[in-house]
Image: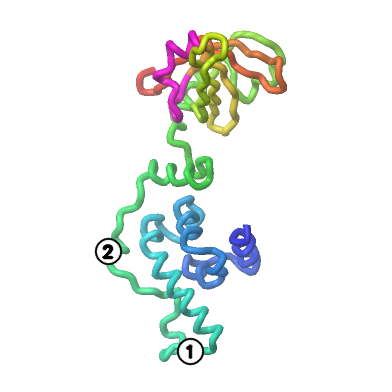
Amino acid sequence: MFAIRNILENREKGLFKTFEDFCQRVDLSTINKKTVESLIKAGAMDSFGKRAKLLMDYPEIVDKATKKKKEGSSGQESLFGDDDPVNTPSFSMTSQDIEEFSQNEKLAFEKEFLGFYLTAHPQMDNLLQLKTQITHEIDALEEEGKEGSVIVGGIIETIRRIFTKKSGKEMAFITIGNENGTLVECVVFPRVFDMYKSILTKENVVLITGKIDSKNDKPVIIADKIHVFNSFSS
């Protein structure tokens, strides 16, 4: 919280021009190296350069910024004055030529550190193309206001498996989401679960045929059939 506040306060004084400018202006005792690394991986520093290169360069940049701040607070000055400022570091060709992360690697970082995809979605093509095979958009289920059969589609975001008290058989509660991040819960009872449990995996894009249960505050899908959707095979 303190790190975010410090970044916002400094940005209000003027946009950060470079990554080195960012490191020089923020409080690095609050925004430690781990925080900086997370910001880079999440894409917050993309305007300053490639993520892979920033990750390689940032320890040295942070160390230089920290050293310069300590010298400034103690009244020390560089032998060469401002001839070697923190925002003009010299790095090896290895750093310059480092290969950038793939798109999927970037998206994985965003999901890990933000909890959602920021720049794109790895399954966007499938999520858009499955619309030709659904009967209801996830966003519109609440507007239906009634029970009925539907075919919905989305990416499996969460899976919670349980054993029923009565029979001891396994079932699951899953949530699927669309390209906008709208979610709907689906209940997979033991008979259906046993048929489709092998495909109930996070990040799978699925089509679910079932019934709307509107008894609760939000509609729930009672699953009858589940199929993995792949635009290349559809």
- CA neighbours of label 1 inside 10 A, class few (<14), some (14 to 19), many (20+): few
User: Which is in the foreground here, disc 2 or disc 1?
Assistant: 1
Determine the residue located farthest toward the bottom in the rendered image.
79
Q: Distance between the Cα atoms at labels 2 and 1?
A: 31 Å
Query: Mark 2 or mark 1, which has the lower sequence index?
Result: 1
Identify residue for label 1. Answer: 77
Whole-percent x, y for residue 207 in the image: 48, 18
Q: Quadrant of residue 57?
A: bottom left
Whole-percent x, y for residue 17 in the image: 52, 67
Identify residue for label 2. Answer: 94
Whole-percent x, y for residue 198 in the image: 39, 19
Q: Is residue 122 visible?
A: yes
- CA neighbours of label 2 inside 10 A, class few (<14), some (14 to 19), many (20+): few
Give the answer, above or below, for where 87 lies relative to 103: below
Q: Is residue 47 visible?
A: no
The type of residue carrying mark 2 is Thr
